[in-house]
Structures are given as C-alpha cells and as structure tokens.
Image (cartoon, coloured by chain):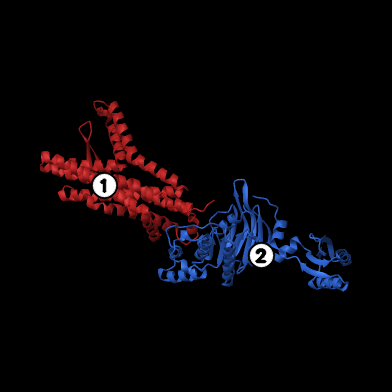
Chain colours: A blue, B red
Amino acid sequence: MDAIELKSLSKSYGKRQAVENLNLEVITGEIFGFVGPNGSGKTTTIRMIAGLLRPTAGEAFVEGHSAQKSPDEVRLRIGYMPDYFGVYPDLKVWEYLDFFSACYGIAETRRLGLIEELLELVDLEHRRNDPVDRLSRGLKQRLSLARTLIHDPRVLILDEPAAGLDPRARIEIRALLVELSKMGKTIFFSTHILSDVAEICSRVGIIEAGSLLAVGALEELHLRVLPRRRVEMTVLEQADHAADLLRSHSSISEIQTIDDRNGSKRQKVLFEFDGSDQALSAVLASLVGNNIQVLHFREDERDLEEVFMRTTKGVVS
Amino acid sequence: MVLKDFRTRMRGHRSFILITAHLLVLILAVSGAYLFFVSQLTQTNNLEDRRLFGKAIFGLVVWIELVMVSFVAPALTSGAISNERERQTFDLLRVTLLPAGQLVLGKYLPGLLFIFLLLFTSIPLQAPAYLIGSATWQEIGLATLLLIVTAAAFSALGMLLSSLIRRTLIATALSYAITIFLVFGVPIIAMILLILFGTIYTGGFPENALITESVLIFIGWLLLAVTPLGTMIGTEYILIDQHNFFLAHIPLSNNTELVLVSPWILYLVFYLVFSVVAVWLSIQLVKRVDS
C-alpha cells in the first residue's frame, strides 16, 4: 500500500485552478520531494492531504484512508508541519510539546519521557525551559519537527521545512530528515530549494500552475529531459584535433570547442554522448591514444536545476 | 487545553491588571456608597433605613459585577478561536486528534473560570451588606445565579463570534456591540416603547383593549427579561413589593391582574439556551473543513 495516494485531486477557487487533476503515489519509506515555484499549488495539495482543505474533485489517501472521509485515521498517521511556525508565546519549549501531546491524547505518564526523547532527537534538550518565542527560526523549525513526531506518525508531510533557514540550519534539518527516514518514516516534503531535494530525495515530483509535470527518481527525470549524456573535457591546445577525432564516433554529437578566457593553452571541448560507461571510457582512451593531452574529463552531473528549468515554464496558476 | 490556557493567561500582565482594575472599581463604588449612606443615616438613623442601606450596597455591588461580567466575558472569549487563526496555530490543532468539542470547551471554560475568579475576589466587598444583614439568602443566591448565567452567556457569545469571524478585532467589536445593545440598548428601546404607548393610551387603556394591553405588557416583560440590569431591578422590585420569588402580578386597566413569571426565570432560560446553542454552533464552525 502506498503511503500517500492522490487520485485526480483538484482544487479551484472560483475560476482559478490551484491544483488540477493530480495523480501521485508516494511509496512507503521514501523521501519524496515535491518541487515547484511559489504559487504552483504545493501548499494547497499538502493541506488537502492533511484534511485541512476540501478538494473540488478527487481524493487524497494516506495509507489507504481518505483524508476527506476518514480524517481521524489520517490525522493519526500523519505528522504535518506547515510552512509557518505557530507560536504560543507564553509557553516554554517542553510545555509546547506537552500541550500537543495532550492534544493527541497521549497519557500524562508517558509524556515527559517522550518529550525528553524528542528534544534529544532534535537537539533541543538544553533549551527545554526557554520560552518558545525566544528560539531562533532554525530552532523553532526543529521544535516544529519534534511536534510533528509527538504521536509517532508513519508519514511526515512537511511544507517547506527549510524555507528561510540559514545554510547550517538547512543542513541540520536535512540531516534530521535522513535520520527520520532511516527510522522508517515516509517523508513527503515540498520545497523550492532544489539542492535539498537532490541531496536527500529518492523521488521527485515537479508541479507548476497546479499540474504535476514530472514524477520519478532524479536520474530518470534527467534522462527524460536530457536523454544524452553531456561531457566536458579540457585539453592542451589540441581542441580542434580532439573535435575531429570525436566526430568520427557516431554516438557523439553537439561538439563545441571553447578557448580559455585568460589566454592560457587550455581549451575546453563539450559534447553530447549516447552510450554506456564503457563506450565513454573507450572514447577517452582513443583521445589519449591519439596523443591528445587530456587534463580533465567529466560527465555533467544530473542536476535537478537543469531538469527543473527544462520541465517548468515559469507559469503561475 | 484548559491547563495550557490558564498557563498562558496567568503568565501575562493582562490578568493581573484586569483583576486589580475590577477590584479598584468595586472598592471605589462601595466606599463611595458607604460614605454617602453613613452620612444620610446620621440624620435619620432608623432600622428601616439601615435595611435599605444594606440592600443598596448589595445591589450596587451586584450591579457593578453584572455590568463587569457582561463586558469582560465576551472580551475573554472573542479571541479564543480567531487568535489561534491569527497566531497560525489553528491548523496545528486541527490536525491533532483533539475533537472540535474539546477545543471549543477548552477555550470556553478557562474564560468562564477566570470570570469566576473575578467574582470570587470581590466577595469581601459584599461584606458590608452581609454585616448589616439586609440581603436575604434568596437575594444572594439569585444574584450569584444571575452572575454565573450572564458570564456563561456572554462568554458563549464571544466564543461564537470568534469561531465565525477570522479577525479577533472584528469579533471583539461585534461582541461588544451586541453586549451594549443587550445591556443598555434594550432598556432604552423598552423605555421608548413605554413612552410611545403611554402617549397613545393617555388616560389608560380602553376596557375592550385588554388583549392589546396584555400583549404590550408581555413584550415589555420579555424585553426586561433579556437585559441583565432590567432583570435584576425587576426581580428585586417584585421581591420587595409583592414578596413573591417566582411570580409577578401586574394590575390591568379593568382591575384584573396579569400573572407572569418573575424576570429572573425568563432570563435564566433565555441565556442558558443561548449559551448552549452558541457553544454548539462554535463547535460546528470549528469542525468545518476549509473550502
């Protein structure tokens, strides 16, 4: 059974279509990155999964339970973290968690131990008696994550968990998510920070103007939008000779040579290649065999940014 | 929810200021009244005057408390739900397993308990009336009951508006508008109607207009019974004038009487029903999924 399943999920506000016919499955145990520009429908989708917003059409399921028809079953299974931090300014850190654990009906005798465990997990045990309002944004985000875990949900739905955080706090949150994934949690999180997704997600969904444009593992998506491998190499002076040699390979196309801007003898050769790792290795061997002085030879990383830019069109719903 | 609400409420300065201000107003009023009556008593000094003096002190304290409850109660609850929305904690609560009923009651009861705390702190200020011994147990019991029901009703009004309206400021303003209408507006309307009909029927009602007279008295009675102040004065008047706790005998133009239940009974029924309906509606509004 999928952890999350969206079936023809749609939401419109009058004539504006915020989410349109979304079909998606999030596999149990994976970290799924829901990527899209601002206003693309990420938060609307997440609110519908959490049962906070009624869809215009379609249905959202969490572990087989409809968010619309069995909201309590869904609430029991999800830990929801919105893209803002709701504060009770007069509560201390431990009281904040204590309050939410009471809201989940956790027995008073269990609460204290549970709170200590969670504070340790998010590394906030030294701030347990501080008023919530005095925490930095990064710490508040960690506390927020602790709150979503209070009832030990199997599925975490996180809306922009790293938004507005400094680089260190972002890395820490990312590390926490990986740790939670290792603990068996399914994590569905929205973001527009592509490096976070590339770093930790097993699969990605790209949404724009309320429509899901692409879903899959990063490699898959990359192959879909850029089916040929892109290779960059640096040679000493013999770029034209190298280009001629490359042209003799039928699997190579789009060859470009670029002189070094600083006037040095280094020259770059870019080309696209369609073939296996062994074939690419043979290309390099043939270049070296023909006395081309290769200084640097690398395949472009399959980065999400490229996939994102090629998939989306900059449309806002 | 109740515990959290008390924690946050009592940690701020607001509660301390509210209790202090409430007690100061009562102290000033009771001291003023006491000094005034003492100066009057030195001139007359008879037992009946002392009795009236005691009743006046008691009535004054209850009246101030009634007005205070009418205005403090909606203020304490009119931000209960809308504040959660403004603080962006409402969705966090809605995704928990906390039932809507518990959320609403968890917000409603602390407000109510805080009012009881205010009333409790003012008990010593009623002492002069008890010392003189003029207030009967019926009057004390009834005053307490009216105060509790008033607190419950006006808290429920604040709660309902807080669930209905997203902005606390608007919910509070509307709560006050309705409270002012009920506390001061309705008696003014009743007075205007009285003057109006008094002008129409100068010299009394004609004998064949018995039904009209009865209906007008009944409407006036209902208007009296929906205002805290009118109920208090009306009930006290019947108690003193007719020595009847439950029924009022209103003389008609044809020398017969119209028997009506005492205003406090109508008041209790009206405001208790209102409280239950308002809290129930709040629960339904909180339960609603955004569309």
In this rendering, the answer to whether B241 lies above or below A299 is: above
Q: Inspect the image, locate mark 2, and give the three-letter code of the amino acid beneath it.
A: Ala
Q: Residue at x 29, y 26 (%)?
A: B199
In this rendering, the answer to whether B59 lies above or below A77 is: above
Q: Which residue is mark 1?
A: B26
Residue A38 falls left or right of residue A77: right
Residue A294 % position (x, y): 82, 70
Q: Residue at x 24, y 43 (%)?
A: B235
Q: Residue at x 41, y 46 (%)?
A: B172
Q: Element under label 2?
A: helix
Q: Quadrant of residue A180?
A: bottom right
Q: Inspect the image, locate mark 1, and give the three-letter code of the amino acid beneath it.
A: Leu
The reply to whether callout 2 and callout 1 are in contact (CB within 8 Å) is no
Q: Element under label 1?
A: helix
In the rendered image, the quadrant that contains the N terminus of chain B is bottom left
Residue B93 % position (x, y): 47, 58
Other-residue count near label 1 (Cα within 10 Å), few / some / many at <14 / 14–19 / ≥20 = many
Q: Quadrant of residue B241?
A: top left
Residue B264 showing in the rendered view? no
Q: Which residue is mark 2?
A: A198
Residue A87 showing in the rendered view? yes
Count of numbered circles on the image:
2
